[in-house]
Amino acid sequence: MALRTLSTFPSLPRRHTTTRREPNLTVIYRNPTTSIVCKSIANSEPPVSLSERDGFAAAAPTPGERFLENQRAHEAQKVVKKEIKKEKKKKKEEIIARKVVDTSVSCCYGCGAPLQTSDVDSPGFVDLVTYELKKKHHQLRTMICGRCQLLSHGHMITAVGGNGGYPGGKQFVSADELREKLSHLRHEKALIVKLVDIVDFNGSFLARVRDLVGANPIILVITKIDLLPKGTDMNCIGDWVVEVTMRKKLNVLSVHLTSSKSLDGVSGVASEIQKEKKGRDVYILGAANVGKSAFINALLKTMAERDPVAAAAQKYKPIQSAVPGTTLGPIQINAFVGGEKLYDTPGVHLHHRQAAVVHSDDLPALAPQNRLRGQSFDISTLPTQSSSSPKGESLNGYTFFWGGLVRIDILKALPETCFTFYGPKALEIHAVPTKTATAFYEAKLGVLLTPPSGKNQMQEWKGLQSHRLLQIEINDAKRPASDVAISGLGWISIEPIRKTRGTEPRDLNEAEHEIHICVSVPKPVEVFLRPTLPIGTSGTEWYQYRELTDKEEEVRPKWYF
């Protein structure tokens, strides 16, 4: 006969339970008030007494009781998870609160630096009497600091130092500190307008912009297209920009070619912003000196024709200057009828651009002011050869100096190969035999080869320490082989066979399908090898549009001009 289960005993006493809640489970303590004597009917062994007292122990939990206990445990876990989620959300809000623009601190509307009255030489300085008067009448937001007033009159006053900053002059804030002011964007819901300089496309692109803005949507704006050579077809430029952007795997809503000077393409950006902002604030983002403040002024001017709020915002707009690092803090602009804000942000200072290695006095020489005109060199354009010139009918054995910032040694080239330089006119180009190039550089640096210029700059100059060997393949002799882009300066277009009127490029033999050059620049300036930018009337002739699949057509961003 089997042992009878405890649940069959009649009228068992109620058991006393105590429950203690933990973050992840519920523990139930059972305190039985009675003991029980069990006897196995099938076994002849004497009974074992578990207690001197008479009575019965607490019964095992029934299925219903176990179900209730599981439900209580599940509910307790839900409560704990909810509390943890609330705690995480609270911490996230605290981080955002520390990073967002502090509207309680009055800042200069020209550069975004906090207003102060103690240090005359520091950004944000204003006269104490004027400050107190403006504060009394609640007009601090209408004040511009002394540094911005000097910048507006053409003075070159740098303020950014550190990794990516600028040597020479006073350094009041580091590039890392300015970059930290943008870190809150990844936690906010915002519309990002990213600016890229067409003259320094690779150097100013910010390939890792997602580290700053997270998953926020991006409108890509190409600036300074008015600097491209005459006859440039914007259809070719727009297609080229989209192709390069797709290769960088940066998903964008649309691409816009603009000029803040002529206002070309700005109205299209304004329409796209109105369409895509959807209640979100708009942040203008880009590398230092790509023209963010100039673009905002052009944007406000365009929007003011239909929007009275934007028209009122033009009165206190960010200052424009050729100095990289003009904007030192986020500048809030009330530009939309719906109440959303437009923010001019500090430029992202990149250590791999030429502006980060030259003295502050030489910065104006790096900024092209007028439309670019290429300077072309082939063997026929070189000056009369001397006894030290290499023998032969090609550029092999020659060296080009682009100011004192770039050296290009021609190791292997075709007799008809042509190098065309696009960049600021202030940097002269000199060609010398490679065997005498080092002596020429040491003798002429700071004289013919500038920048660097001046004794102080010469003493701080560390030379061309970075060398990169490039092997450029020639796939089609009728088209340029490639561009060599120097970060923060410009680019060199390389034609395997220079095209002349009335002649067709000859066929190449097997040994003529590569061009070898060595490019030397200061550390840590970067050198990029990219597809040739189709500029001028010749670019329209050789540029080829790639055939797209249906899937590529769907995901490919549209471009506008």
Image: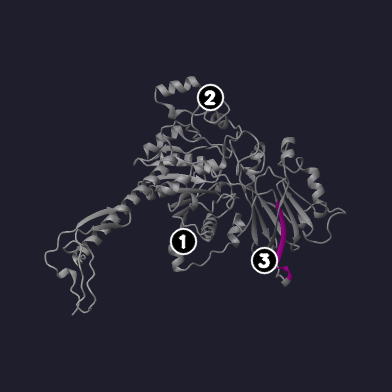
Q: In which quarter of the image is residue 425?
A: top right
Which residue carries the number 1 mark?
Answer: 556
Locate residue 252 relative to residue 156 in the image: left or right. left
Which residue carries the number 2 mark?
Answer: 118
Q: Is residue 541 inside the magenta stretch?
A: no
Tell which residue pokes out farthest to the left in this image.
11
- Residue 212 at x, y percent in the picture: 49, 49
Secondary structure category for the residue under label 3: loop
Q: Which of marks 3 and 2 is in front?
A: 2
Which residue carries the number 3 mark?
Answer: 474
Q: What is the span of residues highlighted in magenta in the rendered image?
A: 511-520
- Residue 209 at x, y percent in the picture: 50, 51
Q: Which residue is drawn at 66% across and 43% down?
A: 357
- Residue 416 at x, y percent in the picture: 74, 62
Secondary structure category for the residue under label 2: loop
**Mark 2 or mark 1, which has the lower sequence index?**
2
Give me the C-alpha separation between circle 2 and circle 1: 53 Å
